[in-house]
Structures are given as C-alpha cells and as structure tokens.
C-alpha cells in the first residue's frame, strides 16, 4: 500500500499541536483508513521503536445488547489500518503491543474474539515485528445484577507496573476538598481509594509497557460518558491503569456533604448514599453475601430508581472528581519514567504521542457501556489529546469548555498537557481548516448527551 499524505502540506510536525485532522468516512475500510493517516504525524515512529496501541476495549459489547458492539469499542478496521502504518514505519525492527485494561467485569475472551488477532500476528510476522495482545487488568469480576459475586486474579502486564505518587500540586487533586465520606473508586473498599488520595499523596498504578514504550497511539472510540461528559483520548487513558480502585470516580454524598455523588440532597439520596456505602464496605466485599444479596439489587432499583433514569454515582455535569484523575493519568503517560518519577515539564520531554479517533460509528446517550449508535462518519488524527478531544466535542455539538476534563486541561500548571490556548485549536476537515468557533453547521453531528449532562454542555446557538 502507498499512503496518502493528506494533511501533511498544511502544517509540519513541530506545529501540529492544536491542529486535528478530520477525515470523512462513511464505512469501515482498512485500506482507506490506512491511506488517510498522515505520514507527517506517523513520522514520529522510528525503526526499532516499541509502539503501544491503546484501543477503547471497555467491554465486549453493549451492556444490554450483546450483539451490538461496533459503536461501543474501537473497530477492528481502525486498529488494522493503524497497525499497517506502524509496521511500515518500523521497517522490520521494533515491537508492537496492543493493550488495554477493560472494565473489570468485561470478558476479555469475548472481547478479543471481535478482532482479527491472527491477521495482526501474520502482518507483524511478515514485517519481522513482534506483536503482543495484552489485558492490563489485575482482576476480572463476575457480576450478577451489577453485584460482584466472584473475582479472578489475572497476570496483567508481563513487564509489571509502575507506581507513581503525585505529591501535592503535582496532582490535579491538589486543593480539592473531598466529602467526609471521601472518594469512591472502582471497588467496594472505599478506604483503599482514600488512602491512595489523602490530600497529600496521589497513588496510581500504570502499565510498565506503556511507560517504557517509545510511542503511544491512542485509538479512542468517540462516545458520550455519564461521568465525564464524553470519552475520547483523555478519558481513554483510564485503560493504562492496572489497579482500578486507585482511581477516584466521585466524592460520596450530595452538595450538603461536600460530595458530587448526587446533584441534590433529597430524601432518597440521603438514605441511599449511606446505605449503599455501608453495604459495600461491610457486606458486599464478602462474595458469599454478595451472591445471596444480588437479587435484592433489583428491589433497590425499584425503590431508588435505575441509573439509566436517575442521577447517582457522579453521573452528571457537577462531577468535580473524575476529571482530576483523568488529567493525572495523562500527565503520567506523557512525563512518567519507569522509576516512578516525572521528567522535566517541557514539551521536548513528553512521550511521542499519536491520537486516532474512531467516530465512523459513535455512541450517544448513556455511554460508555449503554449508548445509542450515531453514524458520525469521521476519523480524527492528531498529536495531542487535548486538541483532539476539543475538536471531537465541538463536532458533537458540545461546548468543549463546558466539559471539565477538556476545560481544565488548558489550565494545568504543573506538567501541562498542551502549550497553547483553547482559541488556537483548529480542525482541518477534509483539507479545509476551521477554528472551532467557526465550524460549519453541516460538519457538526449533534449528539444526545447523557441525561445528567443534558442542557449543560450543548453549544449555544449562533455557530457560524
């Protein structure tokens, strides 16, 4: 195959920060995807490099529709097209890892069954390149009625993990006042999450392969997200973490308690919060009790409401917790060393980075696990996650500066993710450059936000 250098005459690699290439594409086609990937952007890959491809492998399918998956996870054609480009750049010398840490209840066996792994191995072998497919998780859970009833230990990253401790103002949690009941992580043991983030210490466990890799390629799937507004390149970094209970997802309680779990302090919230917290801390950690009590979760939904209709667990625009964790992980990717330290806070020390977003089929509504499909018809490509996410949000009909993980990314003082203001971001759509506030209406594909974000993040009328 011979790649098209579309976009490479617009700005060279030194000026790519803030610029995102957007290509219209109405179907999944490996050769076409390969052909639109900019030689200029992929020139960051050198012969002999270790390249990490990080798709969005959050779950094997839509949570309630097991046959639906192509608008939930990164499509095989996108990964294959990028892999071809990577193999071409490596020129017979180097290593490739395709890896992610799905949600803990995902079946990696079912998930990887969606993908042409044998074809990938064949392509790599023919090119003289070693390729490995890795599940980064340390545990996989079995759930019944959304209750964890069994846990299986997994090998995780074959190279192990790197533990980082972002002290004080190195972390975006610096100065954040959590509620009296503290942060809730991914598991039932809230005390572990709060020891990891105690106001001074901020612990993260990150894949060593990712940290030591030369080039990181973020293969995000564009969707709305119940906790962060959207999931794109920034949010996709949750998958490089190997131990999910270190990741604060929300602060317990409602506004009166200083929490962002609920948007209001109504009677149900005041009862539900402490009750569920008690059950998680003292009952559900025991798998025997968890299995016995799992049928009662349906009763709880009847009393307190289903999460697909009721705002809880930080699933709204007022979540002031999760964006901090997301941006911390992006700092660790770009600046982290294998000994757990950070490199100097300047652009020249950042990890080489490429972002490719699969938005041919995307997801709206109650993402990331139960979205509705949107035939958006775009593939986006760039060299930094902040600009990519801002462009994607704008093309979804949202105001990027109303999405916390994007807005706060422009304001990071310690180990910044970008060196330009929001106003400098531009989208090059099929070869034509646009500032974000001047995106033509016909280029925007309006998405339905998750209901906890509806009416808050949509762009104001009056776009030119």
Image: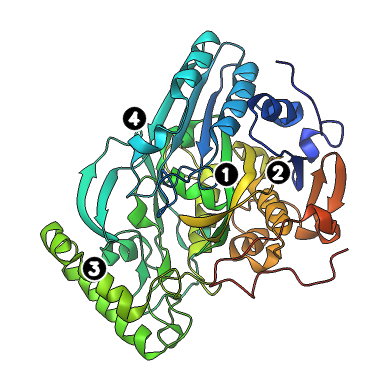
Residue located beneath label 1 in the image:
220
Q: Looking at the image, how many numbered discs can be counted on the residues? A: 4
Q: Give the Cα separation between the discs numbered 4 and 3.
A: 31 Å
Q: For this rendering, which residue is in front, 392 or 47?
A: 392
Quadrant of the frame with the N terminus: top right
Q: Residue at x 53, y 42 (%)?
A: 70
Residue located beneath label 4 in the image:
158
Residue 62, label in figure: none
| Secondary structure under the numbered disc 2 in the rendered image | strand
Q: Position of 193 compared to 250: left or right?
A: left
Instruction: From the top left corner, tell me how far across and down residue 398 is, in percent.
Output: 69, 64
Q: Nearer the viewer, mark 2 or mark 3?
A: 2
Q: Residue at x 35, y 73 (%)?
A: 182
Q: Is residue 349 visible?
A: yes
Residue located beneath label 3 in the image:
280
Marked residue nearer the N-terminal end (2 or 1): 1
In the picture, residue 146 is in which quadrant? bottom left
Q: Nearer the viewer, mark 2 or mark 1?
A: 2
Marked residue nearer the N-terminal end (3 or 1): 1
Q: Give the Cα separation between the discs numbered 2 and 4.
A: 35 Å
127 vs 285: above or below: above
Q: Residue at x 20, y 64 (%)?
A: 294
Marked residue nearer the N-terminal end (2 or 4): 4
Q: Give the Cα separation between the discs numbered 3 and 1.
A: 32 Å
In the picture, residue 181 is in which quadrant? bottom left
Q: Are marks 4 and 1 in contact (CB under 8 Å)?
A: no
Q: Give the Cα separation between the discs numbered 2 and 3.
A: 41 Å
Q: Nearer the viewer, mark 2 or mark 4?
A: 2
Q: For this rendering, which residue is in front, 196 or 75?
A: 75
Residue located beneath label 2 in the image:
378
């Amino acid at each position: 195959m011979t790649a098209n250098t579309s976009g490479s005459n617009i700005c060279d690699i030194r000026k790519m920060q803030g610029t995102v290439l957007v290509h219209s594409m109405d179907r999944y086609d490996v050769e076409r995807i390969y052909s639109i990937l900019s030689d200029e952007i992929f020139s960051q890959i050198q012969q002999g490099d270790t390249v990490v491809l990080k798709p969005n492998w959050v779950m094997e399918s839509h949570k309630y529709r097991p046959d639906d998956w192509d608008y939930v996870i990164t499509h095989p054609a996108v990964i294959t097209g990028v892999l071809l480009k990577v193999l071409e750049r490596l020129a017979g010398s180097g290593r490739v890892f395709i890896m992610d840490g799905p949600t803990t209840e995902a079946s990696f066996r079912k998930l990887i069954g969606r993908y042409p792994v044998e074809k990938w191995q064949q392509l790599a072998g023919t090119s003289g390149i070693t390729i490995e497919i890795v599940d980064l998780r340390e545990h996989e859970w079995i759930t019944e009625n959304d209750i964890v009833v069994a846990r299986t230990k997994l090998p995780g990253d074959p190279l192990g993990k790197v533990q980082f401790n972002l002290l004080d103002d190195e972390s975006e949690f610096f100065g954040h006042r959590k509620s009296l009941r503290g942060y809730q992580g991914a598991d039932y043991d809230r005390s572990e999450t709060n020891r990891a983030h105690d106001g001074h210490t901020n612990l993260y466990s990150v894949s060593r392969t990712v940290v030591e890799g030369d080039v990181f390629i973020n293969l995000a799937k564009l969707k709305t997200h119940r906790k962060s507004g959207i999931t794109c390149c920034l949010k996709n970094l949750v998958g490089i973490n190997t131990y999910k209970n270190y990741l604060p997802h929300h602060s317990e309680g409602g506004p009166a308690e200083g929490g962002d779990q609920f948007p209001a302090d109504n009677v149900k919230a005041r009862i539900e919060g402490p009750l569920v917290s008690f059950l998680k801390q003292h009952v559900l950690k025991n798998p025997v009790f968890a299995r016995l009590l799992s049928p009662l979760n349906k009763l709880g939904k009847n009393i307190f409401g289903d999460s697909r209709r009721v705002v809880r667990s930080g699933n709204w625009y007022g979540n002031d917790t999760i964006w901090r964790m997301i941006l911390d992980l992006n700092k660790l990717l770009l600046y982290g060393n294998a000994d757990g330290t950070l490199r100097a806070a300047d652009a020249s020390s950042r990890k080489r980075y490429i972002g490719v977003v699969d938005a041919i089929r995307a997801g709206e509504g109650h993402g990331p696990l139960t979205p509705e499909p949107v035939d958006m018809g775009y593939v986006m490509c760039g060299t930094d996650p902040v600009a990519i996410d801002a462009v994607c949000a704008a093309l979804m009909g949202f105001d990027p500066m109303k999405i916390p993980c994007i807005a706060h990314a422009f304001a990071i003082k310690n180990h910044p993710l970008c060196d330009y203001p929001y106003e400098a971001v531009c989208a090059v759509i099929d070869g034509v450059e646009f500032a974000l506030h001047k995106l033509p209406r016909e280029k925007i594909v309006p998405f339905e936000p998750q209901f906890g974000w509806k009416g808050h993040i949509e762009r104001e009328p009056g776009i030119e």
